[in-house]
Image (cartoon, rainbow, N blue to C red):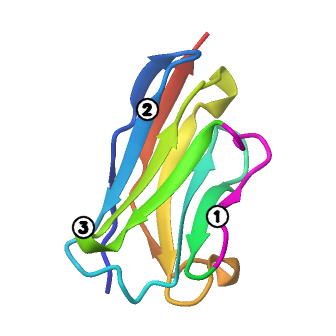
Amino acid sequence: QVQLMESGGGLVQAGGSLKLSCTSPQSLFRLNDMGWYRQAAGKERELVASTRRGGSPYYHSSVEGRFTIVRGDAKNLLWLQMNHLRPEDTAMYYCAADPIALDNGPQYWGQGTQVTVSS
C-alpha cells in the first residue's frame, strides 16, 4: 500500500503561481506512472499532467505551457508547478500513481488539495 499526501494548495489571484507537492512515506520508485488530476465543482475529474518512466510528460491542453510536472524519486516527491493561474484552474487537485499506467485507473490516490484562483 502506498499513501500519497498532497500539499501546497490555496487561494491565489489570477496570474499567480502555486506549487503542489505530493509525498509518501513509502518509496515511489516502483510506481511507473504518476500524475495530477483535478476536479472542479460539477465537473468530471480530469488528468492535468503525468509523468511515466521512459516517456515524455503529458499535459492537458488547457495547462500546457503553464504547468510543469516534476518527479523526484530520491525524495519520494512529485511536484506540479502552476504558473499564470486562471480562475478556470480552480479545482481540487489529486496526486495519483500506478505501478503500470494511469490509463488503467490509478491504483493509488491522495486526499486532494484545493486550489482556488480568484479573478
Provide the residue designation for mark 3. Answer: 75
The image shows residue 47, relative to residue 90, as above or below, that is below
Q: Mark 2 points at which residue?
A: 18
Mark 2 → mark 1, Cα distance in angstroms? 19 Å
Q: How crowded is mark 1: few (under 14 residues within 10 Å), some or many (20 or more)?
A: some
Mark pair 3, 1: CA separation: 19 Å
Between label 2 and label 3, give the one nearer the viewer: 3
Mark 2 vs 1, N-terminal side: 2
Badge 2: residue crowd in 10 Å (few <14, some 14–19, many ≥20): some
112 vs 106, left or right, is left
Magenta residue span:
55-65
In this orientation, which residue lies closer to the viewer: 90 or 17? 17
| Residue type indicated by callout 3 | Lys
Q: Residue 117 in the image: x percent, y percent?
A: 54, 21
Tag nearer the camera, 2 or 1: 1
Q: Distance between the residues labelled 2 and 3?
A: 20 Å
Provide the secondary structure element on which disc 3 rests: helix
Q: If the image is split into quadrants, where does the N terminus sit?
A: bottom left
Residue 88's tag is: none
The reply, left or right, for residue 104 in relation to residue 22 is right
* Vertical order, 8 against 56 (above or below): above
SS category of the residue bearing label 1: loop
User: Which image quadrant for residue 45?
Assistant: bottom right
Instruction: Tell me the tag on residue 57.
Output: 1
Which of the two residues, 53 or 106, is positioned nearer the viewer here?
53
As shown in the figure, which amino acid type bears the numbered disc 2?
A: Leu
| Label 3 vs 1, first from the N-terminus | 1
In the image, 91: left or right of 70? right
Horizontal and vertical percent for residue 119? Answer: 61, 9
Task: Kindly identify the residue that appears in the image at 36 percent across and 84 percent down.
Answer: 29
